[in-house]
Image (cartoon, coloured by chain):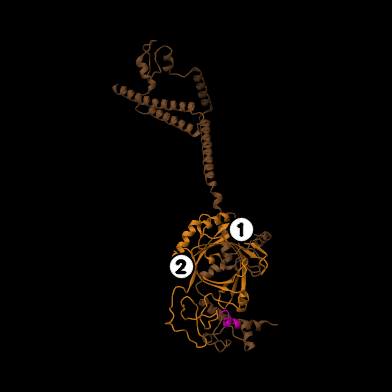
Amino acid sequence: MQREEKQLEASLDALLSQVADLKNSLGSFICKLENEYGRLTWPSVLDSFALLSGQLNTLNKVLKHEKTPLFRNQVIIPLVLSPDRDEDLMRQTEGRVPVFSHEVVPDHLRTKPDPEVEEQEKQLTTDAARIGADAAQKQIQSLNKMCSNLLEKISKEERESESGGLRPNKQTFNPTDTNALVAAVAFGKGLSNWRPSGSSGPGQPGQPGAGTILAGTSGLQQVQMAGAPSQQQPMLSGVQMAQAGQPGKMPSGIKTNIKSASMHPYQRVLSQDGGCYELVPRDDEARRSPDPGLPSDGVPLANDLHPPDLRVLRSVTWASHHG
Amino acid sequence: MRKILSPRVRGYRQDFLKIAQVYPVPYLTGGSESSCVVFNLDTMEAPPVTMMPVTGGTINMMEYLLQGSVLDHSLESLIHRLRGLCDNMEPETFLDHEMVFLLKGQQASPFVLRARRSMDRAGAPWHLRYLGQPEMGDKNRHALVRNCVDIATSENLTDFLMEMGFRMDHEFVAKGHLFRKGIMKIMVYKIFRILVPGNTDSTEALSLSYLVELSVVAPAGQDVVSDDMKNFAEQLKPLVHLEKIDPKRLM
């Protein structure tokens, strides 16, 4: 008995504090609505509602708490009704209930809802019972599914709209194009018209190689090229010149290549002419020996614009020019 | 056929070698004047080694390369970004015609030389370039590294090469912009295919993108260059992804 009374009192206190909080937040919400009506934003209204719902939730939890006795079993009976002002009551209710009289009691001590409300509730319960348990379950499930679908759609839309601003920027380059361009510069894939490049297969001259090559828009590009203004600036090669380290020493790859080029049929033409110069010596010793074509007095080059092999080459072209 | 000149042949009153020949003699760099191989063809002597110091490191110039591409509609933003990042100069555009010559020998792999001329700058010399095979192996190196030899020549370069036995493999026209940052060179250009061989007026664009190349020509062994290049490439993301692309993979 004692324990129950203590429990009752404790739960009542908790309930009281919860209800006081709820009342405060409701009051502030009403104030907000009335005073700041012009500048109110939907998010702040939502915040207030969220607060209220949270407080109602805790209230529910308190009521469902195991230590709370069933209040349903308790009954409040007014013992004395008087039309006089009661100071104590005033203090306890913060000035809201000055008199504990016949008008106040039915409202404050009510345990049932209004008759109209009661009617509506009864009707709703009969409707719900009429449907049947299975159908009700199905309806509940479909409602849940629709809600979750809607939520998904909304969240997806939100995500897409955020990244939608970024997406156009992402497509600033195309890796396929990169590969095609690099291949074109490195070994001429897709460039040679009359000699097909290795990968496009023999017998397909002039066919585009990689998939991103334009076709049939040559007219436009021509116009653009012809219209390109020429500007007075140092050329590309000029830049590279400044950076190039050294002149004519070619890496040894050339040595073997040129050596094998001595098998070039052209070579035979030269030697047949007799007295024409050898373009390339055939072996090491020949390389070190003085070129028969050079002037024998070893005149030093006064002008490095006329190296000896140029003279060689000039006569070679002479010989090769057949009329 | 007159002027096949190497950039630094000066001062030596001796005949120098034909371009095609290679001597195992170490490079002789005579001060500020010359850095070419010299061999006196009358006396058949090399200058005494003690006279001229051998300076190592400048023998092989390597090209460090990073490549990427950018779509036409994003070109403007890339150009703006490059103008901000690179050295402050007037924006340079170029229009070049490049021809690639092959010399097929008895070996399987032909020898490749690239000849380039400017179509919009009158009087500029032709440019001949040799690029070696990319050096493989070092995964830490962020850029493609290959041996590189550059030479300026006169206008009769194509005739010369044809006489030497080279045959033109392919050609294209490159039109675009050039930027510089220190020793780094950034080129953004569009490649145009030449429809009629030899006629540079009939061209069509190869794709809807511009090729972006970041390159440095530096002596061999300076891998710190590739770190600088990588840092610069980071600044161009996400507009362009500059990376080392192995051409052999694309064959």
> Is disc 2 placed on a helix, strand or loop?
loop
Instruction: From the image, tell me which residue sits under label 1.
Output: B208
Q: Chain of mark 2?
A: B
- Is B205 on the left-hand or right-hand side of A131? right
Q: Is residue A117 visible?
A: yes
Q: Chain of mark 1?
A: B
Asked which quadrant contains residue A55, the reply is top left
Front-most of residues B225 and B47: B47
Q: Position of residue A54 (x, y in %)?
A: 43, 31
The residues tagged by marks 2 and 1 sit, at their Cα atoms, a distance apart of 33 Å
> Is disc 1 placed on a helix, strand or loop?
loop
In the rendered structure, does residue A308 fall within the stretch colored magenta? yes
**Seen from this angle, which residue lies furthest top?**
A83
Q: Give the colour in which the image draws chain A.
A: brown
Asked which quadrant contains residue A177, the reply is bottom right
Quarter the C terminus of chain B occupies: bottom right
Residue type beneath disc 1: Leu
**Seen from this angle, which residue lies furthest left?**
A2
Task: Indicate the chain coloured orange by its letter.
Answer: B
Residue type beneath disc 2: Gly
Front-most of residues A123 and A314: A314
A242 is higher (above) or lower (below) than A133: below
- Give neighbour class at mark 1: few <14, some 14-19, many 20+ (Cα, 10 Å): some
Quarter the N terminus of chain B occupies: bottom right
Which range is magenta? A304-311
Are the residues flagged by discs 2 and 1 from a single subunit?
yes
**Seen from this angle, which residue lies furthest right?**
A323
**Mark 2 touches mark 1? (CB < 8 Å):** no
Instruction: From the image, tell me which residue sits under label 2.
Output: B137
